[in-house]
């Protein structure tokens, strides 16, 4: 599987010189510990059984799902459930969600890159204050501000537009974006800036031709991370939009749950369809995402 | 402006010239800061203001002084919700920490299955909370779900969602199922930082795996544990989608935790001033716990893990 090879890559990177030397000792230690061997296998079951049921039951007819063993492999797989979901306006949901995700990523990048750059490159007290504000911003829960946002979005005349989702989602993705970006930008060496400064480069050129190209890893992490936030967000769409034309994927799913009622296979099919785009991104950009998330927690 | 005069200085004091030249004006950060302030910081202040108002969502908020706050302290529903939030947070922490710690330490190793299994373990983090809550809602449906088959093996009553303790445990489990990969990654990152020399020395001294784990790995991961725990606690204090989709706060009000109470008060009964008071209380509790935890385990370490990124 392709997942396997990609996943192995960062590990080799940490020990490029002598991967073999450390290996025998480490392996003996792990094999010697039954907990280390069986724990992950148990968790594998905990993760896989729900996912397996998700996919297999979404391929069953309703009566088969209701009467049969839910763990059995579908005897007569059908895409009927998927058709039902696609016929009930699923593509509108995907379209809206994609728009929200793209706009969110654009706003986050355009606004966060300069903030991170200033935080790393200037020595002003103001910029370190701003940086610390963003650091605190990581801890602000969306629920804390949803009532005032409801008020503000209403006053701005944005209630029930996609902007009502995009703007707060982008704002709440910014703290992590600034942290990740300033982390990668800090790694650009001072000598390179000095060299460019001696060539008479303007700050704009330094950002555009040095800092941005060298922090591509951070930028893609931030892009994926904010896209994921936008794709999976629930609270902002729930409170700040109303009409069916403005509905995004998560809300649509929630709606399917009452619409399809006991047709659980159809609900599961809707879930599978909502995950496919994210999963595709995951397969392509797994490393950027994981490195970024590790960075959030502190290395 | 200092960066207009680099040529004159270039030959004389190179260091000073380079120090000034090419540094971006602070003004570049202003749009980003303003945007963040407008949609995150200012609303936080407005939430505090609204907590002293009464507002039905239609007219203008009308100040009513301390009414909401005195009501909050007498409200038994709020008391129950606050208690349930704390219970849920505790259960989540007790469940997630050991599992994430062990998985993270395991994933930091170099055995061959690690990469493949880690890739699978990561999948729940990609699914939206909505999708996960709906998935488990279906799995735990007593008429349909896997719970019919698997429940009896594991000693779980298929009607687990109908009991108040059961429903709360399920919410904690589902949250853990989703966020485990994130905390595993944090511990994996932490475990990778532990110098191999420590283990080599311990091996030479004849310490076995278990002793190495308790005497090297655990103490070395102390700061990682703080980071992970703070995020876990703030995270589980703000579970919302899971409760809305899986239990609607029930059975009765037995899973009505603070965020759900806030939502119900604000957006179902349109008592938005009181909802703002609940939200403010939520922030105070979450921030308080985080600060306490960080203080107890050393504030500097938290900052340095962040700044060293």
Image: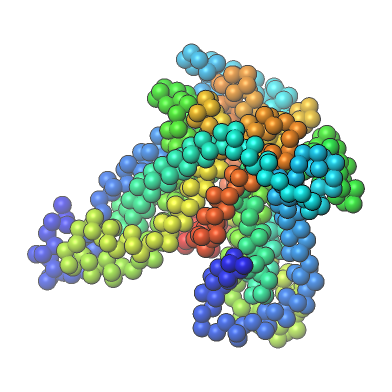
Evaluate whether residue B58 shows in this view: yes
- Describe residue B98's horizontal placement relative to residue B294 as left or right: right
* Residue at the (36%, 38%) spot, across then down: B34
Residue in front for this viewpoint, A67 or B156: A67
Q: How is the image coloured?
A: rainbow
Residue B165 versus residue B126 in the image, above or below: above
- Describe residue B289's horizontal placement relative to residue B165 as left or right: left
* Residue at the (15%, 52%) spot, across then down: B1
Image coords of residue A92 (percent x, y): 51, 35
* Residue at the (31%, 58%) spot, across then down: A121
Residue that extends furthest to the left in the rendered view of this protein: B8
- Describe residue B295's horizontal placement relative to residue B137 as left or right: left
Image coords of residue B254 (percent x, y): 77, 31
- Describe residue B72's horizontal placement relative to residue B16 as left or right: right
Evaluate whether residue A142 shows in this view: no
Residue A37 versus residue A62 in the image, above or below: below
* Residue at the (75%, 84%) spot, across then down: B206
Residue in front for this viewpoint, A106 or A127: A106
Image coords of residue B24 (percent x, y): 26, 54
Q: Total label count?
A: 0
Image coords of residue B41 (percent x, y): 45, 36
Classify residue A180 by image quadrant. bottom left
């Amino acid at each position: 599987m392709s997942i396997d090879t990609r996943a192995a890559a960062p590990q080799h990177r940490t020990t490029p010189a002598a991967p073999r030397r450390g290996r025998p000792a480490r392996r003996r230690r792990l094999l010697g510990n039954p907990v280390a061997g069986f724990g992950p296998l148990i968790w594998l079951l905990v993760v896989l059984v729900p996912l397996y049921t998700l996919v297999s039951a979404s391929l069953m007819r309703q009566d088969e799902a209701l009467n049969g063993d839910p763990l059995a492999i579908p005897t007569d797989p059908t895409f009927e459930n998927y058709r039902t979901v696609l016929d009930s306006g699923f593509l509108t949901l995907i379209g809206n969600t994609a728009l929200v995700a793209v706009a969110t990523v654009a706003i986050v990048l355009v606004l966060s890159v300069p903030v991170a750059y200033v935080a790393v490159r200037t020595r002003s007290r103001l910029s370190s204050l701003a940086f610390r504000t963003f650091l605190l911003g990581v801890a602000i829960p969306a629920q804390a501000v949803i009532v005032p946002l409801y008020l503000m979005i209403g006053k701005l005349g944005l209630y029930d537009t996609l902007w009502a989702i995009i703007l707060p989602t982008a704002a709440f993705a910014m703290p992590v974006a600034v942290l990740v970006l300033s982390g990668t930008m800090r790694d650009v060496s001072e000598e390179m800036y000095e060299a460019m400064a001696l060539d008479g480069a303007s700050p704009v050129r330094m950002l555009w031709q040095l800092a941005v190209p060298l922090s591509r890893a951070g930028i893609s992490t931030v892009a994926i991370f904010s896209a994921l936030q936008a794709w999976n967000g629930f609270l902002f769409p729930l409170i700040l939009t109303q009409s069916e034309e403005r509905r995004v994927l998560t809300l649509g799913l929630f709606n399917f749950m009452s619409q399809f009622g006991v047709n659980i296979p159809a609900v599961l099919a809707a879930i599978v369809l909502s995950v496919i785009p994210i999963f595709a991104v995951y397969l392509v950009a797994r490393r950027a995402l994981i490195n970024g998330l590790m960075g959030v927690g502190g290395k | 402006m200092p960066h207009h005069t680099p040529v004159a200085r270039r030959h004389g004091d190179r260091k000073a010239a380079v120090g000034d030249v090419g540094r971006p004006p602070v003004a570049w950060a202003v749009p980003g800061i303003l945007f963040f302030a407008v949609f995150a910081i200012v609303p936080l202040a407005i939430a505090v203001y609204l907590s002293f108002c009464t507002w039905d969502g239609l007219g203008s908020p009308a100040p009513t002084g301390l009414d909401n706050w005195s009501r909050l302290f007498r409200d038994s529903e709020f008391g129950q919700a606050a208690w349930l939030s704390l219970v849920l947070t505790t259960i989540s922490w007790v469940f997630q920490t050991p599992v994430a710690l062990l998985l993270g330490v395991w994933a930091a190793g170099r055995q061959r299955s690690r990469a493949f299994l880690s890739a699978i373990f990561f999948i729940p983090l990609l699914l939206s909370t909505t999708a996960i809550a709906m998935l488990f809602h279906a799995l735990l449906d007593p008429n349909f779900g896997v719970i019919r088959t698997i429940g009896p093996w594991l000693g779980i009553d298929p009607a687990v969602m109908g009991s108040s303790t059961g429903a709360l445990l399920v919410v904690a489990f589902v949250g853990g199922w989703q966020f485990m990969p994130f905390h595993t990654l944090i511990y994996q990152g932490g475990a990778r930082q532990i110098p191999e020399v420590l283990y080599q020395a311990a091996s030479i001294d004849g310490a076995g795996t278990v002793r190495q784990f308790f005497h090297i790995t655990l103490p070395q991961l102390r700061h990682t544990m703080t980071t992970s725990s703070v995020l876990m606690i703030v995270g589980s204090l703000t579970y919302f989608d899971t409760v809305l989709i899986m239990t609607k706060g029930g059975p009765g009000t037995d899973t009505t935790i603070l965020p759900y109470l806030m939502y119900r008060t604000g957006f179902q009964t349109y008592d938005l001033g009181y909802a703002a008071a609940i939200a403010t209380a939520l922030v105070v509790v979450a921030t308080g716990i985080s600060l306490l935890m960080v203080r107890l385990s050393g504030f500097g370490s938290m900052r340095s893990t962040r700044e060293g990124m």
